[in-house]
Every structure is written in structure tokens, then in C-alpha cells.
Amino acid sequence: MRVDVRNPPYPIVIGRGVRPERPKGPLALLYDERVAGFARALEADWEIPHALGIPGGEGAKTLEVYGRVLSFLAQRGLPRDATLVVVGGGSLTDLGGFVAATYLRGIPYLSFPTTTLALVDASVGGKTGLNLPEGKNLVGAFHFPQGVFGDLEALRTLPPPLFKEGLVEAFKHGLIRGEEALLEVEGLSPEAEGLAEYLVRAVRVKVEITEKDPLEKGERRLLNLGHTLAHALEAASRHALSHGVAVAYGLLFAALLGRALGGEDLLGPVRRLLGWLSPPAPPPLSFDELLPYLLRDKKKRREALYWVVPLGLGRLEVRPVEEGLLREVYADWQRLIVHPAPSGPPPS
């Protein structure tokens, strides 16, 4: 199944055994060591002369690793018409895209996402970047791939928790667009018959938004739903929480915030998501411990921190929120996270 992005143009292809034609010109391969078999098969098929494997995860998105990859390309004399082929999860596509954006002031790259998170979110939309000790994704650039190719066979290698975590972003897309079908995650697995259709539906939501606002000047900010708290939790815990889990907890906070600001009660579907996910508990961080990371959030404008607030399915606003209300909602959130709802269909 294929989704064609129009602004700027590139294809997103999802299916089993997906592989495009070999790009012309020199190639280099950057891959997550956890999917070395998948990457090496591509390396052999395309006769890629230069390949670098690194450990995946948030540890890949550092200035140190970034410098190492740049030096790898420079030492092998990769020219400006070279294409970087990136294979791995969201951290690899973030890192690889930023390397491609900055090596020789920009070279093309292809993305082969191997996790659900990378497939529905990180590899789509042209956001690339790195973390700093002070916060998540504080370094980055918009650099769009030449194509995204999601082979569903790669998803079979994922541990069940990792497969589920990536679908939190697809669930988020359902909240943003009001597509209730995207909120139904309980029956999904790597072998599920409708998996490709579900993933394509989620990808289309992000594509529709990023086509209108590729550089995040307006509507694209809605895609940060749940991410303000999530990024603070990740940074404050030194990434003890994975991104998908942190976003799930961030969506719970967003639902509470929306209700406190007079919106519809969206706690039901979000708590069912958490029940299905069965995530580890977040570290016991006080609001004051999170506050420095919240204040470094990229959505901050002057002295105000803006939040994506869900006021109903498909009805969101981006607005500043008083610190006093944030503290109250955070206290409610802390009480709720120890009582996630059981998974399963909503009550009739």
C-alpha cells in the first residue's frame, strides 16, 4: 500500500517484502544493530560498499554518535550525490535524517523503518534530530527523505511491548482527526490481517497535516499532542521510559487537561490504551522536578509554554496554560497512573 506525499514529494510504501529499486550513485548504510540481518540483506542486494551499525534507542541520538557517523562518511569520501540508507527504529531515522541534512550541507536519504513507532511517526514528515542532556530533540532540522519503505516482515522481530508502544502514536492520530478506528488497537499484532490498512490510515493523518504545514508553523503543532509531558518524563528520567510509553502517559495528562478546561471527557479510550499497553510505572517525579524540562520545550513562545489541548475527538487547540492548573492536573494524573483501566472493548 502506498501513500504519496505531495509537499515535498516522496512515497511511503507499506507491505511485506517492500523494496524499491536501487538508487543511482554512491550509497552508504546506517543501521540499528538489532536488525542487522534485515540491513545486511539490503546491503548485499544493493551492493552497498559502506555500512555502519550502531546500537539503537535514545542513546543513538547524541552529539557523540552523530559526530561518529559524520566522520564515518567523511573518511570514506562520500560525495554530495551519495544517498544515505537508514534502517532501524525511530531513533535511527531521527539520527540518520539529521546526518543526511547536515553532511556536506545536505544529501539524500532513504528510510527503512523497522518498528511501528518509526513507521507511523518518526520516519514520516521530515523531522530529524538529536537529544541534549537538557532535553529531547533540542537539536534538529527539517530534511525530507526520498522515500519511506516499511516492510511488515521486520515488525515480526519486535518484542510485543515494543510493537505496542509504536501504536500509541497511531492512537494519537486517531484523537487528532477524530478517527475512532485508530483508537481500536487491542486486536492488532504483527500477524493481524488488517495491520497494513491500520498503519496506512495512521500515516495518512500525519501526511495530511504535514503537507499543509511542513515546517510546523501552525496545524502541525497538533501532532505534539501528549508530547510536552512525554518529553519531560523521558529527559528527567534519563530515558528510563521509552518514547511510546511516555507518550501514552502524556496522552493521559492531555485528556485530564482538556477536561479541566471544559472539554469532553476522553479518559475512557486513553485509559483503555494504557490497560492494553501495560506499561512500566513512570518514575516518581514531582512537578518541580519536571518543570525545568517543560520550560525547555520547543513549543514555548517567549515566556509562555503552549500545550496541545484535546477538547473532544478531532477538536484540539494549542494554548498557554497557567502553571497553577498544570500542577493541579499533574496531581490528578499521578493518582490515575496507578489505576489504569483494563484492556478490552468499551462498555456498551
Image: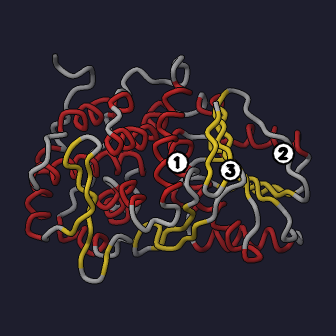
Q: Residue at x 53, y 52 (%)?
A: 122
Residue ranking furthest to the bottom: 302
Under tag 1, what secondary structure? helix
Q: Residue at x 29, y 83 (%)?
A: 302
Q: CA distance from mark 2 to mark 3?
A: 22 Å
Q: Which residue is mark 2?
A: 43
Amino acid type of disc 1?
Answer: Val
Q: Position of residue 307 (x, y in %)?
A: 26, 63
Mark 1 or mark 2: name the one nearer the start of the chain: 2
Picture quadrant where residue 221 is located = bottom left
Q: Earlier in the sequence, mark 2 or mark 3?
A: 3
Q: Is residue 348 above or below residue 144?
A: above
Nearest the viewer among 94 and 158 is 94
Q: Quadrant of the N terminus?
A: top right
Residues packed near mark 3 inside 10 Å, few (<14), some (14 to 19) or many (20 plus): some
Nearer to us: label 1 or label 2: 1
Picture coordinates of residue 297, whole percent (x, y): 35, 71
Q: Disc number at residue 316?
A: none
Tag 3's secondary structure?
strand
Q: Which mark is residue 10?
A: 3
Task: Give the labeled residue for mark 1.
Answer: 207
| Image: 109 above or below 272 | below
Color scheme of the displayed model:
secondary structure
Residue type beneath disc 2: Glu
Query: Of 247 and 209, which appears nearest the observer?
Result: 209
Q: Mark 2 or mark 3: which is in front?
A: 3
**Residue 153: quadrant of the picture:** top right
Residue pictured at 37% horizontal, 52% vertical: 241
